[in-house]
Image (cartoon, rainbow, N blue to C red):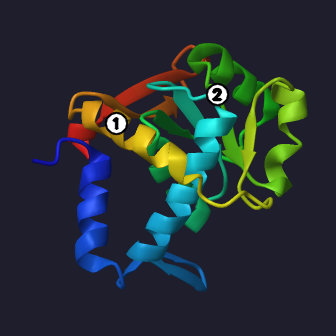
Amino acid sequence: MRINFYREFKNTVQNNAGKIAVYDGERSISFGDLNLLETKYASALFNVSKQAYDKPVGVFLPKCIESIAADLAIIHTGNIYMNLDVKYPVERLRNIFNVIQPVCIITNQKYAGIFNEVDSNMPLLIVDADLDKTDNSVLSILEDRLLKRIDTDLLCIINTSGSTGTPKGVALVHRGF
């Protein structure tokens, strides 16, 4: 029985590895290649986020293949993804961080500099930097974490504007997806 979103993804990869998973403008990626990319991100995230578990991790990327891979990597590490719009002003990002307190941000070199203004102590995973190859020793730890994730565990946080102007996070669980 598949009881979390990542298990559903892995089943899809197994049955459709060569099929296109995501179109990104002129680019596309197959399920098999998306799986390889997210696994590389997941092993790097595990090390960058100091092995955080069941914690929010922000994704500060435009809508692209890399943002999908980042979301999957966060799920793979047993954490909760939170997509952040790259058009958000610095003050809004600060407010979100004060409320949600993410343990890490996944971004690229183009957007990494903004975090010096938002929170200079925030650990960053820069996806277009030369990431190390997948750390296979981490994968068994991540597999053990996934065995613990169930359909009522948090999967993602969506930030709303909040009627008072203070951002609020709406939490969604695996079952909803």
Q: Nearer the viewer, residue 164 or 171?
A: 171
Residue at 71% x, 28% y: name it.
Answer: 92
Mark 1, secondary structure of its residue: helix
Mark 2, secondary structure of its residue: loop
C-alpha span from label 2 to label 1: 17 Å
Specify few, some or many for label 2: CA neighbours under 10 Å numbering under 14, 14-19, or 20 or more. few
Residue at 30% x, 60% y: name it.
Answer: 10
Q: Amino acid at mark 1?
A: Asp
Specify few, some or many for label 1: CA neighbours under 10 Å numbering under 14, 14-19, or 20 or more. few
Of all residues shown, which one is farthest toward the front?
137
Q: Position of residue 81 (x, y in %)?
A: 49, 38
Height in image: 23 above or below 45?
Answer: below
Height in image: 61 above or below 4?
Answer: below
Q: In the rendered view, does 84 fall on the left or right side of 123? A: left
Q: Position of residue 67 (x, y in %)?
A: 57, 57
Q: In the drawing, what numbered circle is on residue 36? A: none
Q: Position of residue 147 (x, y in %)?
A: 26, 37
Q: Nearer the viewer, residue 152 or 11?
A: 11
Q: Amino acid at mark 2?
A: Lys
Question: What residue sits right under mark 1 in the picture?
Answer: 144
Question: What residue sits right under mark 2 in the picture?
Answer: 50
Residue at 58% x, 58% y: name it.
Answer: 40
Q: Nearer the viewer, residue 88 or 156?
A: 156
